[in-house]
Amino acid sequence: MSGRDLFCPPRRVRRGAALTLVFAGVLVAGAATGSFPETGAPLRKAATGPAPAATRHEDVQKAAAEAMADGKSPMEAAERAVSRSGDRWGAVYSEGEYQEFQDALDGRYTGVGLWARSDRDGRIEVTRVQPGSPAAEAGVRRGDRLRSVDGSKVDGRPVTEVVSLLRGDADDAAAGTTVTLGLERGTRAWTEKLRRASLSTDSVAVSRLPGGVTVIKISAFTKGTGGAVRTAVRQVPADTGIVLDLRGNSGGLVTEAVETSSVFLDGGLVATYDVDGAPRSLHADPGGDTSRPLVTLVDGGTMSAAEMLTGALQDRGRAVVIGSRTFGKGSIQMPTKLPDGSVAELTVGHYRTPSGHAVDGRGITPDLEAGPREALPRAETVLTGLGDPS
């Protein structure tokens, strides 16, 4: 599973259908469930636009309660109500799915330990194998081609669907259940039967380039990410440039993204957002490192909380953003529990960058366009210039 394939809650499109996910190739918290601070303020109806979230949540809860009273499935009724609402990011999760999401935000997941991507021809390639995972113990390597999962061919299928097959249904595929992979390496083709396990993952990885630049890769904003980034920055030699790599990061906990912004900003605005028209704002803590040269890398897989961080660093003039336009997921979802333990989410508002740029449906345009192979070399070149006292 992709590092982005670990955290985003699966979206149910219809009862009985295979789980589909918010964004191709990602299973990170693209839908920022519960990740915006609770304000305690009641939801207010906006002057114009659709019914307020409070009303829509009540409608979903009512539909679920009526279905339960009639001996029908509350979850199916809720799914129909969410579908009728026209909410692009609205979704209903079973109790097991939602717990899986919460575990993922804690840096835990059940799976086999594969990161994968789809190439231009639609083939699924393993990009990373987590050390000590079932996949690693079976000898699966980076670069291996994944051809099938439990007999289902995966060529041409979105990575999200492949991940759903690897993980199994959240309510049934626990640690200890098995999954059979069809693999290919060069001219060799074989199958491996793996047993899923409870695994943990680090959201922050640090590396150093030959020229001395430090790369801090954030795969998702799980609990502890902000602290891990702060620790990493403190260990970087003075006056050394940093590349903050947010490519493929589709979000997570907004609180962790704000804490990460505090590492590089000396207080100030990170983002504004609204809840049914009521304005809110998020601010960085004072005391961040504002002098060290910084470049942020983004791509079409950068979304949600990662876009929020990118927008703050860009608008505040703190970082040069390099890569390609980000995904454009700037909406906020909040959950409500249904009678059978399932959870419904509906969009309650949208956030904006410090300059007032609305991200949802638009994304963030980098300062310098660069493809996947060009981005890091270009970041090194830019950092050299930023660090030049002349």
Image (cartoon, rainbow, N blue to C red):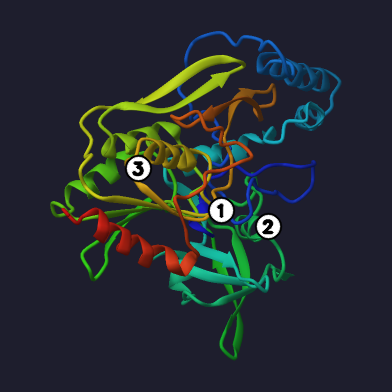
Residue identifier under label 1: 300
The front one of 76 and 244 is 244
Q: Nearer the viewer, mark 1 or mark 3?
A: 1
Numbered disc 1: secondary structure: loop
Q: Is residue 51 left or right of residue 238?
A: right
Q: Which circle marks residue 225 in the picture? A: 3
- Res 89 seen here: yes
Q: Quadrant of residue 61?
A: top right
Q: Residue at x 65, y 61 (%)?
A: 162
- Res 284 seen here: no
Q: Quadrant of residue 68?
A: top right
Query: Between marks 2 and 1, how big is the CA–CA gap?
Result: 19 Å
Q: Are marks 2 and 1 in contact (CB under 8 Å)?
A: no
Please state the horizontal and vertical placement of residue 218, each as a whole percent of the image: 39, 50
**Disc 1 residue type?**
Gly
Q: Residue at x 36, y 35 (%)?
A: 316
Please state the horizontal and vertical placement of residue 294, each as a whole percent of the image: 29, 50
Q: Is residue 291 left or right of residue 7?
A: left
Numbered disc 2: secondary structure: helix
Q: Residue at x 66, y 12 (%)?
A: 46
Q: Is residue 272 left or right of residue 346?
A: left
**Disc 2 residue type?**
Glu
Residue identifier under label 2: 161
Q: Residues within 10 Å of mark 3 (few under 14, many from 20)?
A: many
Query: Between marks 1 and 3, how big is the CA–CA gap?
Result: 21 Å
Whether residue 208 is situated above or below residue 348 in the rendered picture: below
Q: Is residue 365 left or right of residue 54?
A: left
Numbered disc 3: secondary structure: helix
Please state the horizontal and vertical placement of residue 247, each as a whole percent of the image: 46, 55
